[in-house]
Amino acid sequence: MPTIRKVTRGTETIHNYGSVAGGETIDVDGDAAEYLTSTPDYERVATDGESDAESDAVEDTAADTTDTDADSDAADADLSELTYTELRDLASEHDISGRSDMDKAELVDALAEATE
């Protein structure tokens, strides 16, 4: 069963699972995890029996991998290891417009472009 973390402040009730406050984790089924992590309020965290690669594959949507520059690929890999909240804060520091509407993969791409 996937585990998700609420990355924003406040408490929300998730139907059939109860309340979750900012910073807390909760186990949900795959469909609920997919839906909730598509919002900026939640991120998926690795669970027992799930490798980091499996967690990353679910957490990160497909990014453009057509870059042939090894330095750029390394920077993208480092960025994708950050949480959604960390990426959004970094995007704010770089004054990237539209950051509040971006998902994690879009933030990684935008930050990679901004730091080239």
Image (cartoon, rainbow, N blue to C red):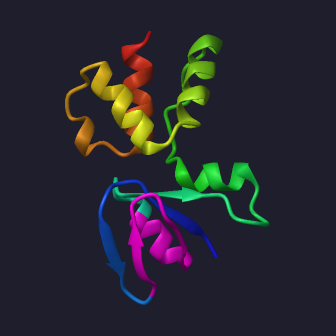
Point 60% across, 70% down: residue: 2
116 relative position to 77: left or right: left
Q: Where's residue 33, x and y in %?
A: 49, 70
| Residue 21 is one of the magenta-drawn residues | yes
Point 55% across, 20% down: residue: 67
Point 42% across, 13% down: residue: 115
Which quarter of the image is occupied by the C terminus? top left
69 relative position to 93: left or right: right
Task: Return the residue nearer the eye: 66 or 15.
Answer: 15
62 relative position to 97: left or right: right
Label count reads 0
* Residue occupying the far bottom of the picture: 16
Magenta span covers which residues?
A: 17-36
Which quarter of the image is occupied by the N terminus? bottom right
Point 56% across, 30% down: residue: 65
Q: Where's residue 97, x and y in %?
A: 20, 28
* Residue occupying the far left of the picture: 97
Q: Is residue 60 above or below residue 94?
A: below
Q: Where's residue 20, x and y in %?
A: 41, 72
- Quadrant of the image occupied by residue 104: top left
Task: Return the residue nearer the eye: 33 or 24.
Answer: 24
- Quadrant of the image occupied by residue 88: top left
73 relative position to 48: left or right: left
